[in-house]
Amino acid sequence: MAVEVLTGLLVAITAFYAWVNFRILKANREQVEALLRPYVTIRTLALPKNPIIYLSIANTGKSSADNLRLAMDRDFYQFSDTNRTNLADLHIFKNEIQCLPPGTELVFMLERGFMLFGENNDPKITPLQFTITATYSYPGRRVQETTTIDLETYRAVALNTDALIDQLEKIRDSLTKLGNVG
């Protein structure tokens, strides 16, 4: 009878170890997938000493985002001009993109900050908030992510200046003065 109890205990311990190893294997597989998968990142950009706010769509992951579909929930006319480009009508928002390779970044001009927050801004033409949905796949997975762009966060924000740009401008001014002396 003691042998049966020990055998049963050994079977239970072996089953527990098998379960723990399975969980570890699954966690490792998920970590590797998270490291190697594509990530379609949608964000706004503001560059130093530049009044234009940009929209960036990038694959910041390590593999291609396949069968990418992007959709905007509203129209957005660049520079508040209905005769210019409506981002929602661009090829990338109307058609499936077969592959967005890792490291690829697409940057679109939106509008100058002072115009976005001016009293004449029409939210039907240049909304301060809109949503972009990205649907894409990679081996074994299909992902849908929604990003809300809120341009209101740029209201009354002073854009940082780049110290290198400031120094280069000082050098340019000095060289211009030297050129005007002689």
Image (cartoon, rainbow, N blue to C red):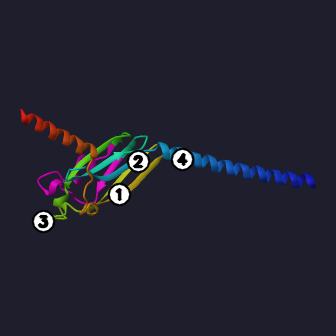
Label 4 secondary element: helix
Label 2 secondary element: loop
- Along the line of sight, which residue is nearer the eye, 4 or 180? 180
Is 32 rendered above or below residue 116? Answer: above
- For marks 2 and 1 on the same chain, the one whose residue lies earlier in the sequence: 2
Callout 2 touching callout 4 (CB < 8 Å): no
Question: Which mark is nearer the camera, 3 or 4?
Answer: 3
Q: Which residue is mark 3?
A: 120
- For marks 2 and 3 on the same chain, the one whose residue lies earlier in the sequence: 2
Residue 64 spot, x, y in % from top left: 40, 41
- Read off the magenta span: 68-97
Which quadrant is the C terminus positioned in?
A: top left
The disc labelled 1 sits on which kind of residue? Answer: Thr
- For marks 2 and 4 on the same chain, the one whose residue lies earlier in the sequence: 4
Residue at 47% over, 42% down: 36
Residue 157 sits in which quadrant? bottom left
Residue with the most extreme front position: 181
Callout 2 touching callout 3 (CB < 8 Å): no
Q: Which residue is mark 2?
A: 39
Residue with the most extreme top position: 182
The disc labelled 4 sits on which kind of residue? Answer: Gln
- For marks 3 and 4 on the same chain, the one whose residue lies earlier in the sequence: 4
Measure the C-alpha gap from mark 3 to mark 4: 49 Å
